[in-house]
Structures are given as C-alpha cells and as structure tokens.
Image (cartoon, rainbow, N blue to C red):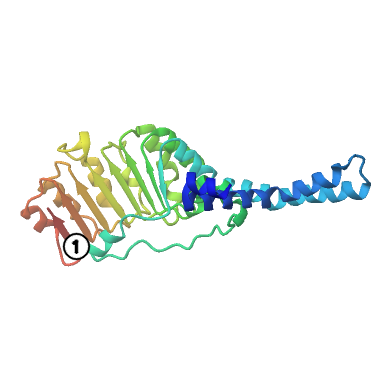
Amino acid sequence: MIVVSLGWLGWYGTGNAFYFAACLFVTVLPLLVAMVLLLRRGLKFSVRALLASTTLVALFFMLSVLPMVRHRAARKVGMQLLSANATINEGVDWDDLYAQVKLDPSPKLTPTYTDAIPVWLTPFMAAVDAIPPDDDVRSIWLNNDRQCSILAENWERFHSLQSVSITRGVTNEGFSLVQDVIGHFRHLDSVCTNDVSPPQNWYASLTNVRTLFVWGEGASRGKPFDKNHLENIASLPNIEMLMVLGYAFDDNDARKLASSNSIKRVIFRSTLVTPVGESDLANDERIVYRN
C-alpha cells in the first residue's frame, strides 16, 4: 500500500495521507473503544460497560467536538464577512508608509485569543484555521452594504481593529451603518475611502482616526473634492496624516487644510496641487509630499 501511495501521491502526499489517518484515528479512538465495550458480547453489556462507554463518548465531545465548535465560534463574524466577499487581515498595510514619512506606526497589538486547536484536529480545521479570530482582525476592506451591516451588528467582536477601508460598492446606507459604530473601535488608527462618495458630514465622525486616505481611483479620478468633506477633514481633532490621490484637488483645497491644528503629514498623488499650494500648506510642523 505504501508503494502504491508513493507512486500516486509522492512522498509529500503520502506523508499527509498518513498524518490525516493518524489524526482521524486519535479523534475517533474514544468512540471505537466505546463501541467495542458495548458490542463485544452482542447487545448484552453490563452497567459498568455502559458507564465506561458514556464516559468515553463524553471524552470525545470534550477533546474533539467542543474545541472545533469553539474554534469556529471565535471566527464567526469573520466567516460572515468573508462569505459576503469582504477582506479581513491580521496585519496593517501602512507601516512602511509611516516609516517613509517619519511617523510612528500603528501600535502592535498582542493577540488575545489563545485557545489553539489540538494538534490531532488540525487536518479537519485547516480551512477554518486560515481565518483569523474576530478578536485578532486588524484590517477590514468593505465593498458592499451587506458587509457594512455585518460589521455594524457585530462591532464588539473586533477588539483589535485598526484599519477600515471602504471602496466602490458601498452606498450611503452602508456609510451610515459604519458611522454609527466607528467611534467604538478603541484601537482604530486609519480609514481609507476609495472611489466612493460618502454622505455629507460623514468624515466628521472620524474623531478617533489618526490617518485618513482619500483615494479617487476609478470613476472618481479627476473629479473635484467635495468642499463639505474638506471642511470636515480639516476639523478632525486627532488626524495626523492625510493622503489624497486622484481627485482634482487644487491649491485652494490645499490652503483650506492649513486650518487644521493636528495634521502633520499631507501626501498628494496625481492631484492638481502645485508647488505654490504645497508651500502655502507646509509649515514648521507640517510636511507636504507631492508627486
């Protein structure tokens, strides 16, 4: 059998097959022993055999079923988001950018979920194990209202959330749902809006955000930036870095940002800002990058 397996599956595949078989055997071993105790004399068994079999079945549930249920439950909302085509991640993508503009990166959060799956169950939970626990998710990308609804209904599950990106496909309804809960995320550090038009005064709700990325890719490229949004952004109390990409953002828009008391870094990419607007916005505490 081993020779046939090596011929069909190779060394790696054969090793995985034996590992899977061993894990399956260990998982169902209590059930096999319980079955032997009950059936070794046909259907005639003693009270002692019945008690022993019941204990073995309980052991099976405690050592195998319960850990798998807990493992899935820890990822319940993340699995809902993934089924709605959202993207979730245990990392944050902006650390390299922070280093380039000489700002402190997002704080490294220590994972709080430590209930690891037993080793003999890993072959059966590989797909689930690839999904981060809800409590360890640090980044979420939303592209439809269903995803926004899931996040709004389960915001308390994401204790480590640091970055939220909202892209084309989210309507005003989805923005309103996110707006209702975005202030609850204690570690939220950055928000990115890409090729979307939030409702009026939506940006004013980002009072706990340090970094804001406003990207005008796709259908938004080359369009003027909404003046109300600009005023809201300039009034945010904790924003330290703003990146504008793709919009027809001009020198007058740049000058309006000069009223901000908190912005320290501004990055303009593919905008209409000239060296004059850059000079008007920059000061001793604020550095402007333009390309």
- 268 with respect to 241 (left or right): left
Q: Residues within 10 Å of mark 1 (few under 14, many from 20)?
A: some
Q: Position of residue 251 (x, y in %)?
A: 10, 48
- Residue 208 in which image quadrant: bottom left
Q: Position of residue 148 (x, y in %)?
A: 42, 38
Q: Position of residue 287 (x, y in %)?
A: 17, 62
Q: Residue at x 35, y 32 (%)?
A: 171
Q: Residue at x 32, y 54 (%)?
A: 93
- 42 with respect to 18 (left or right): right
Secondary structure of the residue carrying tag 1 is loop
Instruction: Tell me how many marks there are.
Output: 1
Residue closer to the observer: 61 or 13: 13
Q: Residue at x 16, y 36 (%)?
A: 223
- 280 with respect to 200 (left or right): left
- 234 with respect to 182 (left or right): left
Would you say residue 262 is visible in this rendering? no
Please give the residue where the numbered disc 1 appears in the rendered image. Answer: 286
- Say above or below: 225 vs 235: above
Q: Position of residue 68 (x, y in %)?
A: 62, 48
Task: Find the residue positioned furthest to the front.
Answer: 3
Residue closer to the observer: 47 or 110: 47
Residue closer to the observer: 226 or 214: 214
- Say above or below: 257 vs 170: below
Question: Mark 1 is on which residue type?
Answer: Arg
